[in-house]
């Protein structure tokens, strides 16, 4: 009997640990990578981008949904940028971004196109260091500032080589609102309405918690609508800031 109790204890412990791990894995972190450039003395600098990966603190690699293609860097200068890749991550810490280049890179000078030789190591994965700790519900963006002028090197034989010089700019461009209702177990819809009448909705989970994410900075009104016969509850003048989850506390549902 004592041996059976010990075995059952280990089984229960395993279930608890597995449950905790599953809870951790449920967290998701919206993430995007964008491309911009500093102007250079060329007609075009065309870069063949085939993949974008992020690497977490534990070495876990996530392959993002990438917009593959050839990008003329000079089209994205003076504050213009374009979306390269996006996904919802299950890792809360990003330490590195890997940019995978193809072989179809060219530079155009005085109307003439020249191949850009690219070292094989950089084709297989150009590694860029970042240091981001992500917060659930915030849309994080990394801007790859590709310096076309410094990245194109003219060789002694008249050929050109691509040696990417890229600065990473990290930013969070949205905020979130979180809270809780009591008693728990009630079904409810949560609606966040901005001052410009744009609405975002979410649901309360089984623990009474809610999170409305992806909100542009501004002032919002939260309306919690539970199932009948309970009545809606409203809270106004909630300020949302980019990169921050605003906790508005608990609501009592009668």
Image (cartoon, helix red, strand yellow):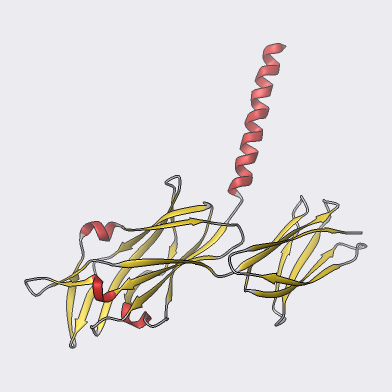
The residue lying furthest to the left in this view is 157
- Residue 210 at x, y percent in the picture: 73, 58
Would you identify the image quadrant in which residue 213 lies? bottom right
Question: Looking at the image, which residue is at 27% across and 81% down?
Answer: 40
Q: Which quarter of the figure is the C terminus placed in?
A: bottom right
Tell me if residue 213 can be seen. no
Figure check: 162 above or below 19: below
Q: Could you say which is closer to the camera, residue 94 or residue 241? A: 241
Q: Is residue 166 left or right of residue 25?
A: left
Tell me if residue 185 can be seen. yes
Q: Which quarter of the figure is the N terminus placed in?
A: top right
- Residue 4 at x, y percent in the picture: 69, 16
Question: Looking at the image, which residue is at 21% across and 78% down?
Answer: 107
Figure check: 58 above or below 138: above
Question: Looking at the image, which residue is at 31% across and 57% down?
Answer: 125
Q: Is residue 187 left or right of residue 82?
A: right
The residue lying furthest to the bottom in this view is 111
- Residue 17 at x, y percent in the picture: 62, 35
């Amino acid at each position: 009997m004592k041996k059976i109790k010990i075995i059952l204890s280990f089984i229960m412990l395993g279930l608890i640990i597995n449950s905790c791990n599953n809870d951790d894995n449920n967290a998701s972190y919206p993430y995007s990578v964008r491309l911009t450039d500093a102007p250079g003395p060329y007609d075009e600098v065309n870069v063949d981008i085939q993949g974008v990966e992020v690497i977490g603190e534990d070495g876990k690699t996530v392959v993002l949904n990438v917009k593959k293609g050839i990008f003329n860097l000079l089209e994205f200068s003076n504050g213009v940028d374009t979306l390269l890749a996006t996904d919802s991550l299950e890792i809360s810490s990003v330490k590195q971004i890997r940019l995978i280049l193809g072989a179809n890179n060219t530079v155009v000078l005085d109307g003439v196109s020249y191949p850009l030789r690219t070292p094989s190591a950089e084709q297989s994965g150009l590694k860029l260091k970042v240091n981001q700790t992500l917060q659930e519900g915030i849309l994080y963006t990394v801007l790859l500032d590709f310096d076309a002028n410094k990245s194109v090197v003219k060789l002694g034989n008249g050929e050109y080589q691509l040696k990417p010089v890229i600065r990473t700019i990290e930013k969070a461009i949205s905020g979130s609102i979180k809270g809780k209702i009591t008693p728990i177990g009630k079904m409810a819809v949560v609606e966040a309405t901005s001052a410009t009448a744009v609405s975002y909705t979410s649901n309360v989970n089984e623990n009474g918690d809610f999170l409305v994410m992806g909100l542009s900075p501004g002032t919002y009104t939260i309306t919690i609508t539970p199932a009948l016969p309970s009545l809606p509850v409203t809270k106004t003048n909630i300020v949302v800031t980019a990169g921050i989850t605003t906790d508005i506390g608990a609501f009592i549902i009668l």
